[in-house]
Image: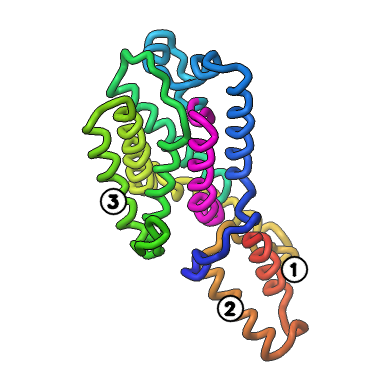
Amino acid sequence: MAFEDLHRPLTAAGFRGAIRWIILISGAVLILQQFVGPQLIGLFGLTPERVIQNHWWWQTVTYLFLHGGIFHWLFNMFILWMFGRELEVRWGTAYFLRYFFICGMGAALCVLLLSPHSNTPTIGASGAIFGLLVAFAMVFPEAVLYLYFVVPVKAWQAVILFAFIELFAGMEGGGMGLSRFAHLGGMATGYVYLKSGEFFALRTFHPFRRVREWIRMITLPRKKRPVVFHEVTDELVKEVDRILEKTLLKGADSLTSQEKAIMERYSKLKH
């Protein structure tokens, strides 16, 4: 992805795909919590004692959609929207969702390992969202973030800072100590997942997709062969720049059917 893509304004264009549904579902659950009360948290929040003794394994996923209040929900969804939209555009919705839930389950596993006999529920998507922060820093390490809207830091520096803050806050203990380690669990899970190469990372599934595309390309007549792009890459951006330059010099009528297909696909990926 071109660096300038990271400076797009926050618009409704980012409210789509998996991010939109995560926000809408967790928002609906938050409203439902106001009517049902603690019973909903007891059934779907992450309670280690119930997960291990009663085998309520669904709680390792459902706890992500519960929140402690409107501000807890707003903060998590804002971070999800701000950083997740770039990852979903680059990876695609299926890969993005896989990563989100793997980080959330990694955070849940951290809670279960650290406090297996606890009957206090853990709720919130923070563990998965901290995993998204790690992914953003790995994909766009040089992107500049502004801490407290003032201090500029690179994405990878910010994530390291967040990790230390969560570690020291967790070591202080207290009621929020376990949640802090859950955040670290989500971060560690995301890092290991993305660093595991062809065995666990997103690239594992790319060869199969390439084979399907190759078979489709050679079996279709040349004029009907599609131009397929699944993400906005540097290669695609360079090709679009070349086509735009050609359009300025020779006009839109000079474009081939393949070049027009590339521009159409690029437009769909961007919007």
Q: Is residue 260 left or right of residue 192?
A: right
Task: Say what amino acid the circle numbered 3 marks.
Answer: Ile
Task: Give the mark toward the camera: 3 or 2.
Answer: 3
- Read off the residue under disc 1: 223
Does residue 110 appear in the picture of this structure? no
Quarter of the picture holding the C terminus: bottom right
Quickly name the residue at label 3: 160
Circle 2 is placed at which residue position?
Answer: 241
Q: Amino acid at mark 1?
A: Lys
Mark 3 or 2, nearer chain start: 3
Helix, strand or loop at mark 2? helix
Q: Give the residue type at disc 2.
A: Asp
* Residue 100 drawn at (x, y percent): 48, 40
Q: Residue pushed farthest top?
A: 54
Q: Secondary structure at mark 1?
A: helix
Q: Nearer the viewer, mark 1 or mark 2?
A: 2
| The magenta segment | 63-91
Q: Looking at the image, is 118 positioned above or below residue 257?
A: above
Rendered residue at 62%/58% (across/down): 11
Q: Quadrant of residue 39?
A: top right
Give SS at disc 3: helix
Q: Quadrant of residue 51?
A: top left
Name the residue: 65% across, 85% down: 246
Q: Position of residue 207 (x, y in %)?
A: 49, 51
> Mark 1 or mark 3, which is nearer to you?
3
Image x and y of residue 209, in percent: 55, 50
